[in-house]
Image (cartoon, rainbow, N blue to C red):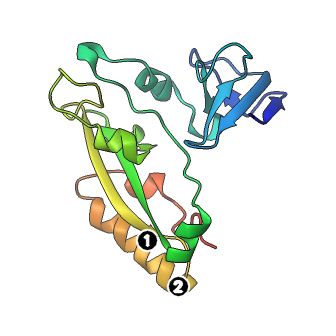
Amino acid sequence: MREVKHTKGLEYYTMNGLEYVGEYYLNPENNIAYIYDDMKVNTKILIPRHTFNTETIRLRSITKGGYEAPVPIKIKPTDLEYTVGIVTRYFVQKRNSPLNTIVEIDSEQFSNIKSNSKKSGIDLNIYNSVSFQWMISGNSRYVQNFNLRQIRDNLKDFKGLDKFLKNSLEFYK
């Protein structure tokens, strides 16, 4: 059973860039918000306000050649991941516009990045990709230094990552 929520606005946008007011639900598996409709399942995705921009709208549409555009996610570490202390984070960014097109994606999308148009997935020729470990529990100073090193080590090939991941203690508990 889905937990249906209501927004009065300023939380989500529709794919065509309009502010959404109405009922929605969060899919607990991928933490993506969908417009609530009794008859349909996972049909209309809502974009969280904190990740919305015109580039996000453009990236969400299906691209030419059968490839898929990345679908941004907001990770939600599990209790097990907090016990282990580390999660793996996955990102893509457009090669021709690296500073403002970073999108965090899930492991399934990351594993489907393709350079062969005969299969669906994100186009490797258009997007850079990176994954790395992100510490979420332990000594706060060590966690912060570890995460800052991860960002720094990936800056050469993934410009703007330091601007996208501003909080090195994100998800820390």
Task: Please name the residue that numbered disc 1 is placed on.
Answer: 147
Which element carries disc 1, helix, strand or loop?
Answer: helix
Q: Are marks 1 and 2 in contact (CB under 8 Å)?
A: no
Label 1 vs 2, first from the N-terminus: 2
Task: Give the percent coordinates (x, y) of residue 89.
Answer: 42, 56
Task: Give the percent coordinates (x, y) of residue 46.
Answer: 62, 27
Task: Please name the residue that numbered disc 2 is placed on.
Answer: 141
**Number of other residues with Cα within 10 Å of mark 1, as a class: few under 14, some 14 to 19, many 20 or more:** many
Residue displayed at 73% across by 34% down: 11
Quarter where residue 36 is shown: top right
**How far apart are the alpha carbons under marks 1 and 2?**
10 Å
Tell me if residue 30 comes above or below residue 37 in the rendering. Answer: below
Amino acid under disc 2: Arg
Looking at the image, residue 125 sits to the left or right of residue 89; the answer is left
Amino acid under disc 1: Asn
Looking at the image, residue 19 sits to the left or right of residue 159; the answer is right
Res 169 visible = no
Tell me if residue 84 comes above or below residue 27 in the rendering. Answer: below
